Structures are given as C-alpha cells and as structure tokens.
Image (cartoon, helix red, strand yellow):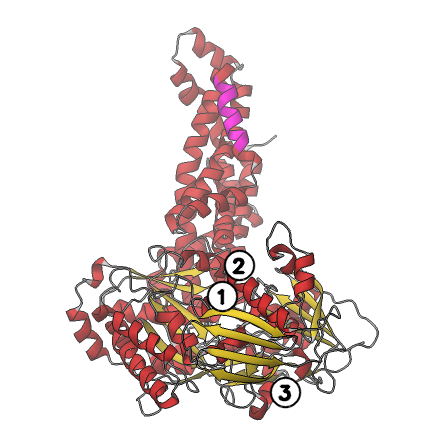
Amino acid sequence: MGINIKTALLSSTMLALTLAAAPVAAERILRADEVAVGEIDPAKGTDYADTILAINLYDTLVYPKQGGSGVQDHLATDWTIDGATYTFTLRDDVTFNTGNPLTAADVAYSYERMMAMGQGNSSLFAGVVDSVEATGDNTVVFTLTEPFAPFLATLVRMPIVDMATVKANEVDGDWASTWMSQNSAGSGQYVITSHDPQTETVMSYDADYFMEPVEGYPETVRFRYGLEPSTVRALMSRGEHDISSQWLPPEVYAGLAEDGATLVTEAGLTGEYFKLNTQRAPLDDVHCRRALAYAFDYATMAQLTQINADTSTGNPMSGAIPQGLTGYDASLPVFAQDMALAQEELAKCAYDPADYPINVAFIAETPARERGALMMQAIYSTLGFDVEITRTPWALFTEQVTDPATSPHVVEIAISAASPDTDSLLYAMYHSSQPPTWISSSFYANPELDALLDQGRVETDADARQDIYAKANAILAQEVPDIFAYELLSPFAVREGVTFHNLADPARTYPTSGFNMRFADISVPETD
Amino acid sequence: MKRAAYILLSNPLSVIGLLLVGAVFFCAIFADFIAPYPDHAGAVINFAFANKPPSAEYLLGTDVVGRDILTRIIYAYQVALGMGLVVLLIAPPIGVAVGLIAGYIGGWTDFILMRISDIFLSIPPLVLALAIMGLLEPTLFNAMLAITAMWWPWYARLVYNITRGEKVEGYVLAAEVIGASKAHIMFREILPNCVPAIVTKMTLDFGFVILIASSLSFLGLGVQAPTPDLGSMVSEGTRYLPDSWWMTVFPGLAIVIAVFGFNLIGDVLRDVLEPD
C-alpha cells in the first residue's frame, strides 16, 4: 500500500508540474538548479549560485589547483613575484564571446570596475592593491600596498570582463551595472542565451573556448532557481533534471539515490557554522556562548548528515578551520557534547537564561536545517533558555544581518573559503574591520585575533603561516563566536547517464567550493 | 430550537457533521489523555525514529525529527479550535454592532460605516491577513488578530441587510411609536431576528477560519515551532513528497475533516433557520 500511494503521488506531482521542457531535436542539455537569485554580474555575485555562473561565463587569471591545494595557471600562463609586485603573462589565444581578444587592458579594467562598484568579492581586495597596470598586450602588473600572502589565491575571485562590451553598454557611468546583470561579457566556456534571476538562466557553449570540453559536454545549460525539493525529485525521476542543488533534505537525496541517481560530494573548504550573535545579550558573554557550544549535540548532528550507508555530508570538526586549509590541526580532538561543562560555563555567565530568550533562525530555502534548530531548542531548553525558532527566507536574512540588533541570536550557515587560502575564510568571518554580512554575522571583534589575521596576510613563509592560523584557530575554539558543527561535504544527486567528472574523481576535484561545476566538464547524454 | 435539534439529528448529513466536529472537539479537549506521545507536541527530537511510515507504533507515521504525527494532529486541533473560537468571539459582535447601527440609523452613519467595511471586503482576505502579518511578528496572537480584522465586515454586511429589511416592519414601527430608545430597538427588537443568520454563518465560518489559519501557517506566518499546527505540518511535509507522503496527507486530511464537519452542520442549519 505504501508503494502504491507513493507512486500515485509521484505521478500526480508530475502532472502538476508546469515546468514542461519543450522537446527539441537531439541535443545535449544539462539541467541543474540552485537557490534564487542568480546574479550574473561577476562584480556583484558572492554566493554559491553566483560562483557557478561566474566560473562558466567568465575566466580568471588563476584557478584553484585541480586535485590539490593552492592555484594553477588559467588565463595567466606564468607569473613572477617580487615582494609586493606581481607580473602576470597572459595567454595570447583567448577571445571573449564577442570575438574581441582578451588583453592585459581588460584585466586592469575588470579590477577597476569591481573595486569601483564595491560589491560582491571586492571586499577580498579592499586595501590590498595599490595599482594595476597593463604593461603590454599580454603583461599585467599588480602592485600591492604591502606583501599580501593570499593574493594569488584571491585572484580566483576576479573574473575578467570584456572592456569594449562593458563600456559600450554603460549608462551614466554605471559601469554597465544594469546591463551586466542581464547579459554576459566574458571569455567563459558558456554564454548567456536568456536570464531571469528568479527563474532560470539559459547558457550555450562557446565553441571557440580555449580549453577542451569533455566528451559529451552539454551544448545548452538550463540553470534553474528556486525549485521545491519535491519538484526536483519528480523531474529527476522523469529524466528532466540532471544535477540537483546541494540544498535538498537528506531524505530527498536518499530517495533519488534509490531511484538510480549517483550521489557525489564536494568538500570545498566549507564549514557548517552556527553563527552566534556576539553583540546581543546573552551571547555577548563568552560563558553563555561556551555553554551553548558544550551543550551542542555533535554526535546527533553527525547522524543527521548521513544520507545513506555510502554517503555522508559532513566530517567532524576540531576548530574553525576545515581540512585542507593552512592552520588546520589534525591532532586536535573533534568537538563533543559535554553537559557538565555546559552547566559549569552557564553558571559563570552574567545572564540568567530564564530572562533571555534565544532566537534560532534557519534559512527557509534549506528546510533540513530546521532539524538543527529543533535540536538546539530541545537541548537549550534543558539549560533553562527559552528558544524560539524562526524560518527566515534568505533575502530577508541578508537584510537582517546588516545590523547586529536585528540579526538572530543563532543561525546555521555553510561558509566556504572564497579562495584556497585560510585568510579568505577567517578574515571575512572574524576580522573586526569586516562590514556586517551573512559571512561575518557573529559580529565578533577581538584585537588579539585581528592582529593574528593581519599577520597572516603579510607573512609569506608557509610554516610561519601555519603557526599563525593554528593560534587563531585555538582562540576561536576558546571564544566560540560560532559553534563549529561540521565540515560540509555538499551533496549533489546526478541523474543516471550523466557524469560529474570533477566530483566523481578526486584527482580532478578543485579544492574551492563551487569551482567544480564547470559545465563543460560534465558529460550528458543526448536528449530528444 | 427543539425543532432545529430534531432536524439536525434526523438529517444524515448533519449527523456526519456533528460526529466529525464532535471528534475534533474531543481530540482537542482530551489531547493529554488520548495522544499516544503527549510530549511529542513540544520540542522533542527523536532522530532514531525519524521518517517512519505508518505502523502499529506510530499510527500515522513520524515527521523528520521523529515525532508522532497522530499526536501532533491531535494537539494541532487545540490550536485550530482555539483560533476559531477566539476569532468568532471577537469578529461577529463587532460586525453585528456596525451592521445594526448602519442599517437602522442610516444616513451618513450608514455611508461611513458601510464604506469602511466595503474597503475591508474589497481586499482578498488572505492578502489582507498576509499584509497584517507582514507588519507584525508571526505569532499565534497576531494571526488571530489578522484573521479577526478580515472577518468582521462579513457580519456587518449580513446584519446590515437584515436590519434594512426589518426596520420597516410593523413591530419596529410599533416600538418607535411607543417611544422605545434606538438602542432598545436595535438590540432588543431587531437583533433577535438576525440571530438565526448569524448562528448559521458562525458555524460555516468556523471551518473557514481553520482553513485560513492553516493557510497562514502554511506560508510560515502562523504558529511557530514547536507548537503543532496543521498548516505548517502540511507545508513542511510537501518537501518530502512523494517519499514521505504521510507527513502531508494526514495533516491535510485532518484539515479536511474539521472544515467538512463544520460545513455540513452549517448547511443543514441554514436550511432549518432560514427556510426561504
């Protein structure tokens, strides 16, 4: 009977689907999805969807190193570092989708545009670069204000735009901001066919791309936004969706796997953090924060990340830094629940839990995280806290976190290192100079930690940096601006017949979150 | 009244309605005694038993954190009925007073009062409630407030129309002639003649209030976790369709039972009390 109802519901959901893809002549199409909004202007995007769009529509000087850590050459074939001066030699065979050749002047312009607009990943470069100069068609020189160790790694976040096209579409000196959110002007392997940031971005392969695609690469990509888990489930079982997003509840991946999909995971230097608002009582008292961290049920959390016998979406954590980043210390014990210590810390806390209700938010688009919130509610109410849970849509949440006073006490978010360097993770999350965003939403300020993070930026010796970040990691474990729940392995369900090579083979995996979904590295069957 | 009771009990439809509504009230009142796992109505997590289909142990299955769905439905009826009772204790008196005054006094009073209620009526109910909830924190109390705000004009309209008809009847004129006060005429002479229509509407509305309240919480604007609520149970369950169908289907059926029961009673009551 169970089976019958399930089948009946499955077919009725299918009937109800309005996302009917019109059948076309044999063509290789890849259909994937992400959370809305899809921002295609590389100077504005920051989140996972934006990253995927940026790496497919645009190229960068360097790319995270395949099968390793650090970076490898991409648009730049070679570079020399002289203190604070970086000289890059560019490939001379790259053209934009428009046919314009990609030159050093475009690189300088792209940097200028991103910084002038001051959005997206520009904060990664703020105060770092003194000047950028195109000294030849294929030579560009970056002069930094002072030595900045993570600079090369950070360049994976600076996509190069076609200066001529952008300038042609500028309106009143807006750097073509409006136009670039609707069109692409890159050299990437894909080019925009149509784009609706709430619904779908359609892209087609650019045959002139300078790198070879894999066998069976998709000619067209339909990147959809905001699909309900049950919709993804039904579309995939019908063969009308190829790669799921990473935000589905574990049960849905398990169901998809049972129906023949392959599950792959991306490590991506990502931590699953429960951000604690260190500016709001009672969590402005470190003892209260420690009490919450000690009481946190890491073991149950680990169980929850288990999709099925073969696939887990989490590794235990021992500090703020995920494996694969400088400062990670494999010898530290992983976190575990300790209610006695929690009570002890709570006794030292200046606040009486009964008087300070705690607001735990979870992001509406990631429904599985309600479990973490419910778990906290169950445990923390035994400590005497009144815990209220709110389901907050992502758009509202990003608005709330611009002010610590409106930001929730606790929220579970996955945060990835923007570049393959520890600095891009810790600095963005915890340096007191950072503006309030979802990444820095614990609003933590500690001069001692600031000093270490500043030091990590100028120190170029690898061993010395390991020590610096290990120290920072130890401070963070003591100060608990966040509860370090687990290292996230982002899961993706891949339809039978489709191969996500970069994640299926560890030797081909790029270390940074989102950089694996290069559409031309995915093999799809023909659709007719 | 005796006649009404007789007809209600002799009509098979209303008997079904009474049984359904009776069962719903029984569940809500005696939840603590009949729910198999009373603590599952609160902040309980039991991941070892999460996502279990219906079985002897969990008759209607469990949700994603391992709570018994039957228990949560039983407790959700408390919230649903409480919502219905509060809204129907506040909205009709306001609406009735407005309708009586506007209908009987007429003139500018009529014009102003009825145009105000027309403004409320012109906005789709769910949109109005959503707008109010958008301004306020999403809590049970505010949900009640929002629903009450959209509900009273219907009573104003209903009573207004009856009053307009009644005020030219002989008994009203007679009362006026002997010098009865306006308040006396409105509330002692005309109001009793509106009662059958009001009672019928309230019975029918009970189901609709439950439905609207469920819609609000389906959209995430009603009762907050961990309080069980039918609308949010359906909403949460849809994410796990079609595999974990019991998470959606049973709370959905629970809403159907309550709304259907009240409607059956309301329908028959209307035939009895307004035989025209």
Q: Is residue B70 above or below residue B162?
A: below
- Residues tagged by mark 3 and mark 1 found on one chain of the structure: yes
Determine whether label 1 and label 2 are within 8 Å by CB.
yes
Q: Is residue A416 above or below residue B160?
A: below
Decide which of B119, B266 is in the foreground and name it.
B119
Mark 3 to mark 1 CA distance (whole Å): 31 Å
Q: Amino acid at mark 2?
A: Met
Upstream in the sequence, badge 3 or badge 2? 2
Check disc 2 and report its element: helix, strand or loop.
helix
Residue indicated by mark 3: A501
Specify the segment rendered in magenta.
Answer: B109-119
Query: Which residue is identified by label 1?
Result: A122
Q: Residue furthest right?
A: A25
Q: In the image, residue A282 lies at what x, y percent? A: 24, 62
The C terminus of chain A - image quarter: bottom right
Label 3 crowd bin: few (<14), some (14–19), many (20+), radius 10 Å:
some
Q: Secondary structure at mark 1?
A: helix
Q: Is residue A53 above or below residue A263?
A: above
The residue tagged with tag 3: helix, strand or loop? Answer: helix
The three-letter amino acid code for the residue at tag 3 is: His
Q: CA distance from mark 3 to mark 2?
A: 36 Å
Q: Does the residue at mark 3 contact the one at mark 2 (Cβ under 8 Å)?
A: no
Sequence-wise first label, 3 or 1: 1
Q: Locate residue A71, reporting x and y percent.
A: 53, 84
Which residue position holds label 2? A117
Q: Specify whether B19 is left or right of A316.
A: right
Is B160 or A244 nearer to us in this picture? Answer: A244
Chain at tag 3: A
Q: Which mark lies nearer to you, 3 or 2?
A: 2
